[in-house]
Image (cartoon, rainbow, N blue to C red):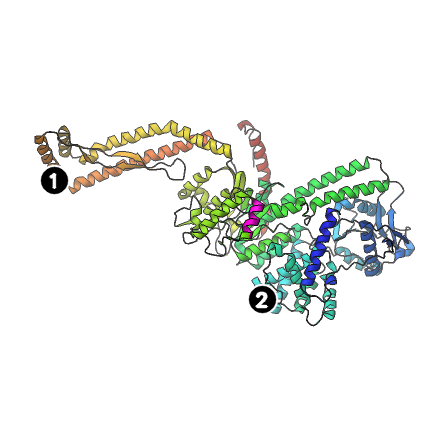
Amino acid sequence: MSRKTASKKKAAKALTSQQTAVGTSNPNEFLSSALPKPERNAKGEVYCPLLKEYRSATPEELVRQSYLLHLHQHYNYSFDQMLQEQRQQAGKRSPRVDIVIWESPEVVKRESPKIVVECKAETVGIHQRDYYQGESYARATGAEILVMHNARQTSIFNVVRELMPGELVQINDLPRAEDWGNAKRIEAIKNSTRAFSRDEFRDLLFRCHSILRDVHKMEPGKAFDTISKILFIKMYIERAGTWGTFTTDFIRQRQKTRLPDDAPVHEQLFQLTRQYYEPHRLFSKDDRLDEISEDTFTRTVKELERFNLSATGDDVKGIAFEKFLGETFRGNLGQFFTPRTVVDFMVQLLDPGEDDLVCDPCAGSGGFLIRAFEHVRSKIETDVQIRKDAVRAEIEAMNLSEQEEEELVNQRFTELNLELEPEQDEPPSRIYRLAHERIFGTDAEPRAARTAKMNMIMHGDGHGGIHFHDGLLNINGVYPERFDIVLTNPPFGSNVGEDQKVGDTEQTYVSESPQYVRQSRERYGDDWYASHQQMVRASRARTPLLNLFEIGENKANRPTEIIFLERCLQLLKPGGRLGIVLPDGNLNNPSLSWLRRWAEGKAKLIAVVSLPEETFKSAAASVKASLVFLRKFNAEESQAWDAAWQDAHDKFDAGFNEKRTEVCTQFGSRINCGDEPELSNLLEQLAGLGVQRTTPTWRLKPPPPYPRGFVQTEIVKSRWEGTPKKREDKAKARTLREQFDERWTNEIEERSNELIRELRAGLRRVDREQFRLLWREVRTALDYPVFTAAPEQVGITATGAQGPSQLPDVLRAYRMFESWVNAGARESERPQFA
């Protein structure tokens, strides 16, 4: 049994068990496919009505004859106006297609055909270039419509002559046989595109949302949750290959035949959907769709049924869904949306690859994770297509028979297509591995986390690694030093306080379930287990979240974005890359210079792109922000950093210590006598008797954990030392001390304190100068160029509407900069940017 067949049987078995679970009156046929089954004889051969013969029931033949019957029964095409396995002309290289349809039986082979159908047996998504023979035939013969069909999906295209090969316009449906006599009807069908624009798809979502809101008086959030459930029903049905069941006709027929004790059709469909997504914990076990009536569900299905979400481009459907979300939750979830142009730019700049692990600990609606998923998926699809082209060229050069060549091409293409199959898990396909093993995220807001999962599925998949949890804590696959790339836009304007403790809330809960620990340790290994044990200890001790971080430990509070900066660097592997949105105050506020120096000791700064103020503008406020890109030190760079500091200290410390001694010497005697000559004379006399008042000296405070190189000198205060050896000298010394104390007036003490302040100021100047020189020395020793840009337009206007963007130009400039750096960063070859 092939991997593909095994996977399909496993899915069919799961589907049957799900149907039985909800107690339908006919569970084996509740979601049966709408396509008819071809006739078969006692030998199992399939009947081909166009050829008037039985043939071996190969997977492709079964698909072809099933769709042929669908054309006959549903679209009313007679067998007399269709032909099977037609060539455009004689010769082996002439394209041959499965089914050709003419306007009427009378014009078969006398005029240009109207429809060309090419079928494939693979149960993977339709890949347009695999159907090259059908397009070649359609263009050569003047056919108007091309149908690409496999066992699970149908795509229909209008063949526009003015467009280049490969540029087809997807439409919503086929004309029926009787439509060909009506030019207006044919034109309307051709204009009914399935690949809808983003605005059209967004408007559809709004219409569905409005139905739920208006009929059942739902508040926007509840209406959104309900429309999401309906969308997931539709996506589940499309994935099951039973598209005929998400129609108003199917619902009405089921309503007529439903037994009295059966649940309503929409509730049964939702329970099947909930069970299908149960491994991903998308819905709770108590979730239902009973908050709407059957009539409301039917109205919504009527809006959605002519769309094929699986066939609609992920970029169209995904962006429309994001726009719908953003406008629906303008006041509630607006903070969870980063402008698409900014997201695209950040992902493209970091350029994740197929083997990279990607995380967003503040995932919001999932924008960064979605774009990273799409970016890598596109790379995989391009690679597979290049290999397909090479395979085809290789096979065509073998000089095989036509049948052998076709079978070998189909076999090799089927194998390659399995790499793109999102459900292929045994062994995992490249797309399955990307979706299930490479994309991770968390968000502490429950609706945002659920929306991110929904958004990811709407864009293609990859939702399994997204969790409702505080991103500052480890959960499942999100733990320190695991990721190659972290992309995030942390929340601004809030604080993490010392009252926020591990284990106090649902978002900070740490599971100690033996099953969770066992499964996670098996999947992620000992590194995960060590990080989990840290979380368990923190939860049991109710440790403040701040104490999990170097820059938060023992602090009353820290701005959230600052703590997330450390969290992101914590999550990265050595050498991993970070793209983060930060308020400009983090970059230019003098009071946060310690943060910048702290980060400089953890990672290399790759680039800073300053954004216009309107990029993150809301009704409440606007935040001027920048995109900051960092690369975490690897072991060699960390060693170089430490060595540079050691060299700098060796070079400067002794000299600055001498300066401190000089400053103390300059002020010491003056401080002891308050600049009073008579007191100075008494001190000299006491010194002659062996009693001294030491001058103030200096010592360095223990260095803080950050920033590196920070020095702070404290003063060791004056004190009396020594005792006269002779008895008579002791009496003299006592008298002199009494005289000194009597003359040490408040005025003199104030003068002495002023001198101490001057001494401290002098020592602080030395400290600052040493700090400055240490940093200058280290930066000089480890100097590297940093890319900076300040585009004036990034796709968002001052009113919040879409507008022009200079970010593509910035990206091109960065690529030039990157190439220059990789080539050695010679000053004479530095690229010039506009």
Quadrant position of residue 753 = top left
The front one of 5 and 256 is 5
Residue type for callout 2: Met
The front one of 39 and 350 is 39
Relative to residue 770, is residue 504 depicted above or below? below
Residue 329 percent across, percent down from the top left: 56, 58
The rendered magenta stretch, by its main secondary structure, is classed as: helix
Residue 788 percent across, percent down from the top left: 52, 38
Left or right of 273, for residue 599: left
Residue type for callout 1: Glu
Residue at the (72%, 47%) spot, across then down: 3
Residue 207 falls inside the magenta stretch: no
Residue under circle 2? Answer: 218
Residue furthest bottom in the image: 260
* Quadrant (top left, top right, bottom left, bottom right) of the C terminus: top right
Residue at the (67%, 68%) spot, across then down: 264
Residue under circle 1? Answer: 742
Task: Provide the secondary structure element on which disc 2 rests.
Answer: loop
Q: Does residue 363 appear in the picture of this structure? A: no
Could you tell me how many numbered marks the image carries? 2
Task: Provide the secondary structure element on which disc 1 rests.
Answer: helix
Residue 457 percent across, percent down from the top left: 63, 53
Tell me the distance, in whole angstroms, between the alpha carbons under discs 2 and 1: 86 Å
Magenta-tinted stretch: 515-524
Q: Which mark is residue 456?
A: none
Residue at the (38%, 30%) spot, across then down: 649
The front one of 646 and 616 is 646
Asked whether the beta carbons under mark 2 and mark 1 sit within 8 Å of each other, the answer is no
Residue 820 percent across, percent down from the top left: 57, 31
Q: Does residue 731 appear in the picture of this structure? A: yes
